[in-house]
Amino acid sequence: MKKKVVGVYLAAGSSRRMGTAKQSLEMAEGVRLGGVALLKALHSELHSVVVVVRVGDSLDWLPEEAHMHILLGRCRIEICADAESGMAHSLRTGIQAAEEMSADGILVLLADQPFVDGEMLIRLTNMFNKEAGYDYIASGDKGMPKPPVILGRGMWPAAAALEGDAGARSLFHLPAYRGQVVEEENQLKFMDIDTLDRYEQAKILFSHQYM
């Protein structure tokens, strides 16, 4: 039976290294960084997508199409009150929302990974549906698990107990959990925008890929 997988889109980072709210940075005219991977998630087979943001986010970066999904109930915005304490707190907010939706798993995506694509998300959800008993399915960068990653319900209590900037990756080596790392050949898909240099580089790559 197909499992109910909810996307948890982490968009509450402080962008300290960037000196500006990076979700609002333009990748191309009218295309904001924060909206690129969100549309990939909304176009996927995910049941719905929870967008976790920080207090005071103007949401000016949300694509027009996302507003339609919000009205339809397929996308919901959750504010993480303690987002400045680190990514683990945003993840906890997403897990709480997924609990309310009675999801079987969450697919965690980062708002600053603009080159994640639909194929990647389909591979992860297919593997999670197919393999009974897996606690997680992670994307693999030369064997290293990286987001996007699916966490099954059995991992949620441990993931929700993480603090600071600790990611769920710290749980994957524990013997309590069984999972699979799905190798991704194209390392560009893991590129995250965390410096201005990286942003300039990503804009050029994005223009070649999408324009």
Image (spheres, rainbow, N blue to C red):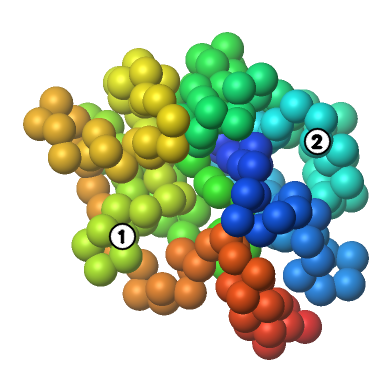
Q: Residue at x 66, y 20 (%)?
A: 81
Left or right of 94 in this view: 26? right
Residue extending furthest top? 100
Q: Residue at x 64, y 49 (%)?
A: 15
Q: Distance from label 2 to label 1 (Cα)?
A: 31 Å
> How far from the left and from the top, in percent, is residue 202?
63, 75
Left or right of 99 in this view: 176? left
Reading the chain from its start, which is encountered first: label 2 or label 1? 2
Left or right of 1 in this view: 179? left
Q: Amino acid at mark 1?
A: Gly
Q: Residue at x 70, y 33 (%)?
A: 53
Q: Is residue 32 above or below residue 1?
A: below
| Residue 57 circle label | 2
Q: Secondary structure at mark 1?
A: strand
Q: Secondary structure at mark 2?
A: loop
Q: Quadrant of residue 149?
A: top left
> How far from the left and from the top, in percent, is residue 48?
64, 33
Q: Is residue 146 visible?
A: yes
Q: Is residue 129 above or below residue 40?
A: above
Q: Which residue is mark 1?
A: 140
Question: Would you say the residues marked 2 and 1 are in contact, meaning their CB atoms lie under 8 Å apart?
Answer: no
Q: Amino acid at mark 2?
A: Asp
Pointer 1: residues within 10 angstroms few (<14), some, or many (20+)? many
Q: Is residue 151 above or below residue 78?
A: below
Front-lying residue, 136 or 5: 136
Nearer the viewer's eye, disc 2 or disc 1? 2
Q: Quadrant of the N terminus?
A: top left
Pointer 2: residues within 10 angstroms few (<14), some, or many (20+)? few
Q: Quadrant of residue 6?
A: top right
Q: Quadrant of the C terminus?
A: bottom right
> How far from the left and from the top, in percent, is residue 29?
88, 72
